[in-house]
């Protein structure tokens, strides 16, 4: 299939065979060069990481650690770049399978060997969260491990809504970027400057505030104590909106006998357990009917003895156990922790790590996220169309190239990123303007 | 604060310094609680130096052992601590009198408090682990003493330390009423009127945030009066942490002093007695024996990890760390360890992937990569308090991190008798995890009542092996009793009493003055500006 080389304008046939857009992991090495040359949105990406650096603080970008995973699983750390150009060039040279973003250090990471281990240190980094579907394996029937489906994806929707509300309303953060991890989870980047300067201790504390699920080998992970904190009440509000559809219909948590046993184990009252067990196993009622019965039994017992606090919240505890966000504190705790960069390509699925519009969480479909092969295919096709187009010819080649992603499906997701970015830069502009006027002494 | 200086300056300072027992007035110690902002500037004898420090260290060590068996600030904890302090350091039980005049004796106690704290800073600033230990114990002590004070006393303490906060207005309280009443059992609708709330940035009360004991709004925490301790503790902790780091940096200058160094070293040796020297058993264990040993000599935590590894051929990070370092401690060499992990993890992810992803980390643990730290196996304290296991993890302390029902089930599957299981369950309920482990050790080794206290999985293993190999009767391992060091200073004559100076020769006089000035100089240098 003839293809115009966008740099030289030559025609030549492609050796890639992009005749259809289905992704196959074997073709990744040949697709990545195209991706990094024509699709990766360097402009907005670097604008983000520069945080609107004014002339006084260029170090935001140049002191940032990146790490690359290359072909053959070679992993290189402490990469750093002075500007967008350098980053572009390096990515186009190395074509890494994966890029991680680390902290902003006291010195350019690529020079780290020149410094005594005491002087070179991580200074700031975004507050990040990683929510991984494998952490929910014990409460989802439809899939296990790396597999996800549209049914259990609801868990991610719940997690995003719960966390986003808490981060904005409780903690007062405003610049939050949610990104699809490419396969089985989501990442959250909190980019406020207040967030970037948080200590490891503060980050741990935030995760603990947000967490409800106890780890370890427990049979019952959630125990609500009086009084129930407003944060948990807010979470319950979110979970309730999904419970009927997700818990009772798609996950069908009281469907068969095994499921029933699993759920009943979470009720801390042997009488109720026995009663419901007999009832459910002898009838063929639906999960919805059974859930009603379960709630009734618990409230009946509680109404008889208001001191029996154990059953008061039993039903809510079950809902939370099945739906509440499960966070990995180790990802969020460390200021120097490396997390996969947005706009990476996941090698197993080929999907791009795209931003998620938090205002429209319910309509995000992880199975509709563009793959790298689809995007490369689109770019090639578009190029055929514009080849020979006079307007396209008159635009400088460089300008054409860096906006090519806008003509692919990636642009739908870039709108989300653009919104996030403009809000972020507005804020930084304000702070920079204040700094500048302070320096000038002009109020 | 002056830093360093020439001998001339030292002489000048010496001439300006406060005399012993003079100038001890309310101004230097306005409150019996202190934030230890400024170092002491008077003279003390070497005897006092060692004695003051020793007294305080005893208290800190007692706090340490108490925290294993009682929940902090619970009634039992407070009662036991009060009892101990009554006998050993009544000065810490003094409450601030407020407006009444402070007695000589009370001032003397405050002075000792002040000096001993700063001496221990020198002793405990050298390593990260020591600093952390010291910080935690001082914080525990501070909190205990703070809670003894009356409201008025607290207010004056806050004022003196420039920690003033303004309570929120009634309007704000009204606005947030539905939320403020849903935080703690004490602040009910009725009590809301009388409770003061302070709106502070959430970073100032992280421990309240992490346990959800405050209402958060737009990055601010609404802290009720009672929880003020958290704000203060945070300040205390931050301040002390910075100070310790600074002290550590100035420490090299102390290296040349051979009077103070031995004293200082003897204190922190005890604090780390629970650390395990990995070289002790090197080469003694082969990986073929691990299965058997996991059932006979491993503590439960390691047996759990070994089992999980063998069954699933997979362990997550902290599980690999906890178990891997334990293996190093029991004597598995690097080569054997690599062989073992490759065999087990290899069955899960394939040997190639093992080489790529895990071999480096194992070599790192043995100190063969990176900055070549020879990591020590985790102690019980570390396992119990750090890195709580998440849903798919198998590390941690089974007595703490496994639910009681599952623990019973597990013990039953290991053929433990029901009586012992009941005993263990009771101990676990009372949060006595290490004692529960001890009970299990006694049961499995058919001992009546040993005084072996479990503080480290590798100690457990060593003791077990000794018994099984019939080497020794279980010895009285008293890791908890750190008061073993008798007060036996090894210098000859204390000689810096001013009154006696007229009897000394010129030479001795000069030596005394030099010694005193170095102490003072040191105190000045090791403070913050």
Image (cartoon, rainbow, N blue to C red):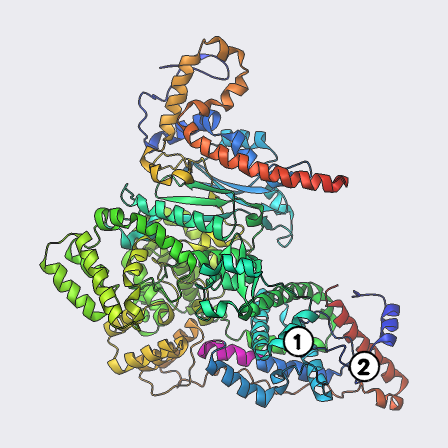
Answer above or below: position of A373 versus A320. above
Secondary structure predominantly adopted by residues drawn in magenta: helix
Residue marked by disc 2: B23
Q: Quadrant of residue B107?
A: bottom right
Magenta residue span: B60-72
Residue B110 placement (x, y as % from top left): 69, 81
Q: Residue at x 33, y 55 (%)?
A: B314
Labelled disc at residue A406: none
Q: Quadrant of residue A375?
A: top left
- Crowd rating for badge 2 (residues with CA inside 10 Å; few <14, some 14–19, many 20+): few
Sequence-wise, the earlier of marks 2 and 1 is: 2
Looking at the image, can residue B279 be seen? Answer: no
Q: Is residue B172 left or right of residue A343?
A: right
Q: Is residue B283 left or right of residue B7?
A: left
Please tell me which residue lies in front, A276 or B345: A276
Q: Secondary structure at mark 1?
A: helix
Q: Residue at x 68, y 70 (%)?
A: B159
Image quadrant for the N terminus of chain B? bottom right
Residue B310 placement (x, y as % from top left): 29, 60
Q: Is residue A236 left or right of residue B373?
A: left
Mark 2 and mark 1 on one chain: yes
Please name which of the two marks, 2 or 1, marks the residue nearer to the observer.
2
Instruction: Give the chain of mark 2.
Output: B
Q: Is residue B64 magenta?
A: yes
Instruction: Give the chain of mark 1.
Output: B
Residue marked by disc 1: B117
Q: Residue at x 66, y 66 (%)?
A: B163
In space, the residues marked 2 and 1 are separated at their CA atoms by 20 Å
Answer above or below: position of A345 versus B141. above
């Amino acid at each position: 299939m003839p293809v115009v080389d966008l740099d030289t304008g030559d025609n030549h046939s492609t050796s890639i065979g992009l005749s259809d857009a289905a992704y196959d992991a074997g073709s990744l090495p040949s697709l990545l060069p195209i991706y990094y040359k024509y699709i990766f949105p360097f402009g907005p990406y670097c604008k983000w990481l520069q945080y609107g650096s004014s002339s006084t603080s260029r170090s935001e970008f140049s002191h940032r650690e990146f790490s690359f995973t290359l072909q053959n699983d070679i992993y290189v750390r402490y990469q750093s770049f002075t500007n967008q150009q350098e980053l572009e060039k390096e990515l186009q040279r190395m074509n890494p399978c994966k890029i991680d973003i680390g902290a902003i250090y006291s010195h350019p990471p690529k020079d780290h060997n020149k410094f005594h281990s005491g002087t070179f240190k991580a200074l700031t980094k975004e507050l990040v969260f990683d929510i991984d579907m494998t952490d929910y394996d014990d409460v989802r029937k439809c899939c296990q491990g790396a597999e996800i489906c549209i049914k259990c994806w609801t868990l991610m929707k719940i997690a995003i809504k719960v966390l986003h509300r808490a981060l904005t309303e409780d903690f007062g953060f405003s610049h939050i970027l949610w990104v699809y991890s490419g396969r089985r989870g989501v990442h959250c980047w909190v980019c406020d400057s207040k967030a970037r300067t948080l200590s490891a201790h503060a980050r741990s504390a935030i995760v603990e505030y947000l967490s409800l699920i106890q780890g370890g080998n427990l049979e019952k992970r959630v125990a609500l104590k009086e009084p129930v904190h407003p944060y948990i009440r807010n979470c319950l509000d979110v979970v309730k909106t999904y419970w009927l559809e997700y818990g009772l219909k798609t996950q069908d948590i009281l469907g068969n006998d095994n499921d029933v046993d699993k759920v009943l184990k979470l009720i801390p009252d042997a009488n109720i357990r026995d009663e419901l067990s007999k009832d459910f196993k002898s009838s063929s009622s639906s999960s919805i009917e059974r859930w009603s019965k379960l709630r009734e039994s618990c409230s009946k017992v509680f109404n008889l003895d208001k001191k029996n606090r154990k059953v008061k919240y039993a039903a809510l505890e079950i809902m939370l156990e099945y739906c509440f966000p499960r966070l990995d504190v180790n990802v969020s705790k460390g200021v120097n922790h490396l997390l996969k960069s947005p706009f990476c390509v996941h090698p197993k699925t080929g999907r791009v790590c795209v931003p998620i519009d938090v205002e429209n969480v319910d309509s995000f479909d992880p199975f509709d996220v563009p793959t790298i092969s689809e995007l490369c295919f689109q770019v090639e096709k578009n190029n055929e169309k514009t080849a020979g187009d006079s307007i396209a010819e008159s635009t400088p080649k460089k300008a054409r190239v860096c906006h090519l992603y806008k003509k692919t499906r990636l642009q739908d997701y870039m709108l989300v990123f653009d919104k996030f970015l403009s809000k972020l830069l507005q804020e930084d502009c304000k702070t920079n303007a204040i700094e500048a006027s302070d320096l000038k002494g002009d109020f | 604060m002056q830093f360093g200086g020439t001998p001339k300056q030292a002489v000048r300072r010496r001439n300006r310094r406060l005399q012993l027992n003079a100038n001890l007035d309310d101004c230097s110690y306005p409150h019996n609680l202190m934030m230890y902002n400024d170092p002491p500037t008077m003279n003390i004898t070497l005897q006092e130096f060692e004695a003051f420090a020793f007294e305080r260290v005893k208290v800190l060590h007692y706090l340490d052992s108490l925290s294993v068996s009682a929940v902090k600030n619970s009634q039992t904890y407070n009662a036991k601590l009060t009892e101990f302090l009554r006998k050993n350091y009544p000065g810490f039980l003094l409450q601030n009198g407020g407006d009444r005049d402070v007695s000589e004796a009370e001032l003397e106690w405050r002075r000792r408090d002040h000096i001993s704290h700063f001496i221990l800073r020198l002793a405990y600033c050298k390593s990260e682990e020591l600093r952390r230990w010291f910080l935690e114990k001082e914080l525990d002590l501070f909190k205990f003493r703070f809670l003894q004070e009356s409201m008025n006393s607290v207010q004056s303490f806050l004022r003196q330390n420039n920690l003033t906060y303004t309570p929120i207005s009634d309007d704000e309280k009204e606005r947030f009423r539905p939320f403020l009443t849903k935080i703690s059992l004490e602040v009910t609708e009725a009590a809301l009127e009388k409770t003061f709330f302070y709106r502070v940035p959430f970073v100032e009360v992280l421990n309240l945030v992490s346990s959800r004991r405050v209402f958060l709004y737009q990055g601010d925490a609404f802290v009720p009066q009672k929880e003020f301790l958290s704000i203060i503790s945070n300040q205390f902790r931050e301040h002390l942490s910075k100070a310790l780091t600074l002290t550590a940096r100035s420490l090299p200058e102390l290296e040349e002093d051979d009077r103070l160094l031995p004293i200082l070293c003897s204190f922190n040796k005890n604090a780390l007695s629970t650390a395990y020297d990995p070289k002790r058993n090197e080469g003694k264990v082969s990986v073929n024996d691990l299965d058997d040993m996991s059932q006979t000599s491993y503590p439960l935590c390691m047996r759990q990890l070994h089992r999980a590894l063998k069954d699933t051929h997979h362990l997550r990070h902290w599980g690999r760390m906890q178990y891997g370092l334990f293996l190093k401690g029991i004597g598995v060499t690097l080569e054997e360890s690599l062989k073992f992990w490759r065999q087990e993890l290899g069955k899960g992810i394939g040997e190639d992937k093992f080489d790529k992803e895990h071999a480096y980390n194992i070599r790192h643990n043995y100190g063969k990569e990176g900055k070549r730290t020879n990591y020590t196996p985790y102690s019980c304290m570390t396992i119990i308090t750090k890195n709580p296991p998440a849903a798919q993890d198998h590390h941690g302390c089974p007595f703490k991190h496994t639910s009681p029902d599952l623990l019973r089930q597990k013990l039953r599957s290991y053929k433990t008798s029901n009586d012992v299981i009941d005993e263990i369950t009771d101990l676990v309920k009372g949060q006595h995890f290490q004692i529960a482990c001890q009970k299990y050790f006694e049961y499995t080794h058919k001992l009546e009542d040993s005084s072996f206290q479990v503080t480290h999985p590798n100690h457990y293993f060593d003791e077990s092996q000794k018994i099984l190999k019939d080497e020794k009767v279980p010895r009285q391992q008293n890791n908890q009793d750190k008061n073993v060091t008798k007060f036996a200073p090894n210098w000859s004559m204390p000689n810096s009493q001013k009154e006696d100076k007229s009897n000394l020769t010129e030479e001795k006089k000069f030596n005394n003055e030099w010694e005193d000035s170095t102490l003072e100089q040191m105190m000045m240098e090791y403070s913050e500006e």
